[in-house]
Image (spheres, grey):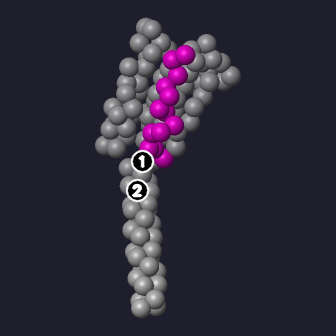
Amino acid sequence: MIDRFNTMIVYTLFILCMLFFTSSSKSQTRRATTSNNIYVLYINANWNKQNDVEWIDSLEAHKVDQVCMTHKPSIQKKCGVEVVPTIIIYKNDIEIKRYTADISFKLKATRKEVQEFIDKQ
């Protein structure tokens, strides 16, 4: 009786582990597929920290970089940044979308809006 009980426990744990690892690998595969060749560049400046986009690191893309224009002023000219914060999305090294702040230096785009655009690529 005890052997049967132990066997059931081991079997149950095995099934639970399989379910856990299967669901984990699916989410990682989805992320890699969704973000194929998508690069997100987030640009802000030290003087505008109060308007930082808090969710930028949670975007699912191949790569997400943050650049402080205060420390790297050349980025302004290189990327044609007129206002901060700015989010630029590239696909295969070509700019495909740009989100910029309004006159109050606040980005109006939401995480959901940006992620949905990335997912459609």
Question: Which residue occupies 37% across, 38% down?
Answer: 115
Which amino acid type corresponds to the residue marked 2 in the rendered image? Ser
Label 2 environment density (alpha carbons within 10 Å; few <14, some 14–19, many ≥20): few
Q: For the stretch drawn in magenta, what is the main secondary structure?
A: loop
Q: Is residue 55 magenta?
A: yes
Region rendered in magenta = 50-62
Q: CA distance from mark 1 to mark 2?
A: 12 Å
Q: Which mark is residue 83?
A: none
Closer to viewer: mark 1 or mark 2: 2
Residue at 58%, 18% (x, y): give it.
Answer: 49
Any part of residue 76 in sight: no
Judged from the image, the secondary structure of the residue bearing numbered disc 1 is loop
Q: Which residue is mark 2?
A: 27
User: Image point 44% across, 57% down: which residue?
Assistant: 28
Report the side of 86 relative to 121 (left or right): right
Residue 61 image position (x, y, % from top left): 45, 44
In the picture, the disc for residue 35 is: 1
Of pointers 1 and 2, the one earlier in the residue sequence: 2
**As drawn, 18 above or below 28:** below
As shown in the figure, which amino acid type bears the numbered disc 1?
A: Ser
Residue 59 covered by magenta stretch: yes
**Residue 46 appears in the picture as rendered:** yes
Residue 70: x %, y % from top left: 65, 18
